[in-house]
Structure formats: C-alpha cells, structure tokens
Amino acid sequence: MTNLVEIRGLRKDYGALSAVDGVDLDVVSGETLAVVGESGSGKTTLTRLLLRLIEPTAGTVRFDGADLHALGAASLRKVRREMQVVLQDPYSSMNPRLRVTEIVAEPLVTHDPALRGRRGRAEIRERVAGLLTAVGLPPQVQDRYPHEFSGGQRQRISIARALALEPRLVVLDEPTSALDVSVQAQVLELLADLQDRLKLTYVFVSHNLAVVQRIADRVAVMHAGKIVELAGAKQLFSAPSHEYTRSLLDAVPNPDPRLARRRVTA
C-alpha cells in the first residue's frame, strides 16, 4: 500500500488554543479514511491544513511525496488539481445566479484558460454532460439553476464539480449531514461506486458514526486537536480502545429500544 498523504507533527494554534495539536497521520491511496469527533475537536481544521487552505503553525503535509507548505504558487496550483473538496451544504457553495453548466465547469475554466470564451463552450458542455451522467443526473439539467434541485441532487452536482479535474484525493466534509436518511444512502452508494470506478481516495469528515461505519476503511478519532485512536473501521466499532471513542459510540442512538436498554444496564 502506498501513502498518498503523509502528515507529520501538524499543529495549528489560534492564540493559546491548539485547534490541531501535533497530528501524525497517513492516508493510503484508494482508501476511505474517516475523521470523526465532536464539534470543536479539530477535524475540519485538519482537513483545511491538508488542502493548504490555511497555513500550519508547525509540521508538514506531504501529498504524493511533495511538501505542500514548501511549494510555490505555480507548483501548488498543479497539485490542487489532484485535491478537491465536497462541502456539507451544497447550496451554500453554489452561486444561485449560475446555471449548472457554469457551476460544474468552474474548476475546468479556472485551470484551463483555453476553455474560456466561445471556442470552449461546446467542449465544456460535453464534459459537464459526462460528469453529470457519472453522478446519476441527466445531462439535460445543465441549463437549470441550483434552487430547482433537491438537496440530494445538489450534492450530486457538487460531487460532479469536485470530479471535473480528475482528482486523486477528495475531502468530503460532512457531505450527507444536510440530507435525510434515504438520500444519505443514495449519496453514499454513489461515492462508493465513483471511488471504485475512478480509483479515488477519500478523507471523510463526519460526526455521524452510522454513516462512517458504512463507508470507512479506517477511522481516525479526534479529541481536543489530537488523534486519540486510529484503527480499521471493523475493529474500532467492535472493540474501541480509547475511552473517548467508547463515549462517542455509546452516544449513537440505537433503533431497537430493547438493545438500547440492554446497553445502558450492561
């Protein structure tokens, strides 16, 4: 197995507070690594550091061997094509005045100036049509606006936009938390299918352990800016070793009241 991302001694301070406190973590090519923890645990700050959206106080992030925080603007721009993100609320990440074609094509136009202007329009529509088909939407929706879609459809559009540059790594920041349970299941199935077909690597940030259990290969548990447990998903959910992890699992509602009472009295 090859590490696509290697994080060493990563730290981010805000005054006297360490949002990320000395994290060491690897992301293996082709896996889904979930990062879980309560609000304020540092998981979102960790992914922002991973994507170099913010600068660290200390430590390194290497992507395919390259130290991201040592790269100049031109080199970083090339690497950014291979790292994309899908956010929690797809509607807030879309310009409501833009049509789907423009939204999905935004990364393409940003990184390939040749696609700007009239000459690139036909190619853009063709490529956007292919991306929409890949995420289970008909190409005919290209000329519609974000408000015309359901939450699940908007998240599919966000995923299409993230795939536009054919990335190797996709950071999924609470991608299903704004969706109802049935739509969550559909989006998770889509993500699994895309990962298999496109050989993607996922970092999946979530506080929803039921979702994490379904999609993750490995799980990193964050608390107070530190990773307190890192294990395979099956091992972590069946035999968590850290007290904080056990408290998170105990807080997950059980759909069977009889089992819930049994867990409380055990």
Image: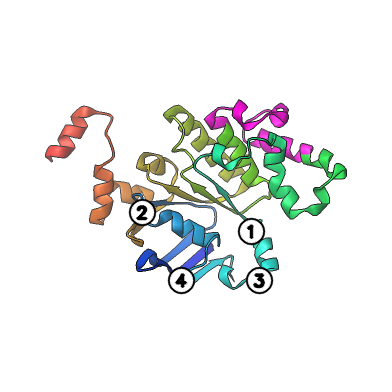
Q: Is residue 259 visible?
A: yes
Q: Which residue is rendered at x = 23% and y = 55% of the image?
A: 243
Q: Are marks 3 and 4 in contact (CB under 8 Å)?
A: no
What residue is shown with label 4? Answer: 57
Q: Which residue is rendered at x = 66% and y = 30% of the image?
A: 145
Image x and y of residue 154, in percent: 58, 34
Check residue 138 for magenta coloring.
yes
Image x and y of residue 44, in percent: 44, 54
- The amino acid type, in three-letter code, at marker 4 is Thr
Image x and y of residue 67, in percent: 57, 71
Left or right: residue 105 compared with residue 202: right
Q: Quadrant of the rendered structure where residue 41 is?
A: bottom left
Q: Main secondary structure of the magenta part?
A: helix
What residue is shown with label 1? Answer: 80
First along the sequence among labels 2 and 4: 2
Q: Is residue 1 visible?
A: no
Left or right: residue 247 compared with residue 60: left
- The amino acid type, in three-letter code, at marker 1 is Arg
- The amino acid type, in three-letter code, at marker 2 is Gly
Q: Would you place residue 128 above or below residue 247 in this image?
A: above
| Secondary structure of the residue carrying numbered label 2 | loop
Q: Are marks 1 and 4 in contact (CB under 8 Å)?
A: no
